[in-house]
Amino acid sequence: MLLVQLKQPDNSRRIGVLENDNRDIRLIDGYETTFALAQAAITQKSSLKDLASAALGTTTVDYATVASESRLLPPLDHADDAHCFVTGTGLTHLGSADGRDAMHKKISDIDSLTDSMKMFRMGLDGGKPAAGELGVQPEWFYKGDGSIVRANGEALTMPHFALDGGEEPEIAALYVIGTDGSPYRLGFAIGNEFSDHVTERQNYLYLAHSKLRQCSLGPALLLGELPTHVQGMSRIRDTAGAVRWEKPFLSGEDNMSHTIANLEYHHFKYPLFCRPGDVHVHFFGTATLSCVDGIEVLAGETFEIDVAAFGPPLRNKLALETLAQPVIHSL
């Protein structure tokens, strides 16, 4: 089941389920947001899919119309952006270290492992522990709060100080924290974890600076478990809509050096991330980057991430920020 959030023409919010090969959205009655539906599912000890199915109404709307009118919303959000954490893990996918290591490895140490390759090797050796055992912790980063999340069709804005605005086609898991402090995974969405690879290339310790950016999610939330093998296509389209670059990407545990459970444990082991009522968006990493092929995405060009199992593709144009640097005042 694929769940979407949208605005009605009067700006009221609704949620619905994609039907008829993603052409229609059947609206759900009684719940205006995914967050409200999730809270009800937690309270009723029901699965999100069962509760959504039971609340399906008779009204359908045309997906293409909603998308063209910019009425799609991210598949999960929080009324207070400060209560939505956006985070991620890197070096988790088989082959994902190739591009990262190419950025960091210097000719003088060609025979030694960089920190990136050491981290990747740790995941290969200990990222998929046996049941009941703890696996090695992955690379982890903070990306921002709910204010950075963009919906399908919204622009991804490159900050005025950034050196690059590049895509990262990934799977993100979406969570709500229950009243008892337990994380509840609602499902998964495709996302663009939009980063600054030129800044990161300068020094790996600039990773945090490269990640504090906007990102996009959706348009749909896939309820249930993530398939063990996910295959999609990442594209860059020029301002005329023609494909300038494309490459397939893989995800799912069959293509990862960590299990989902291991990545989740090492995120939610911190009490800060188990605060009742909070929302979490956690990106799982990627193995495919256009920057590795020498592509520099230009303003007005479109990122496109297409995975059939997740419904319609995620598309966002690149925009450039024109704001001046804030003035710091002394009190």
Image: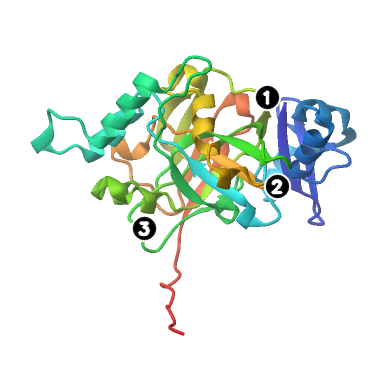
Residue under pointer 3: 162
Residue under pointer 1: 224
From where the camera sits, is residue 19 visible?
no
Q: Nearer the viewer, residue 233 or 57?
A: 57
Residue under pointer 2: 277
The N terminus, quarter of image: top right
| Residue 113 location (% of width, % of height) | 20, 30
Which residue is at a point 34% across and 19% down the rendered structure image? 125
Is label 3 or label 2 in front? Answer: 2
* Amino acid on which disc 3 is placed: Ala
Instruction: Name the outermost residue toward the bottom.
Output: 331
Q: CA distance from mark 3 to mark 2?
A: 33 Å
Of pointers 3 and 1, the one earlier in the residue sequence: 3
Secondary structure at numbered mark 2: loop
Of pointers 1 and 2, the one earlier in the residue sequence: 1
Of pointers 3 and 2, the one earlier in the residue sequence: 3
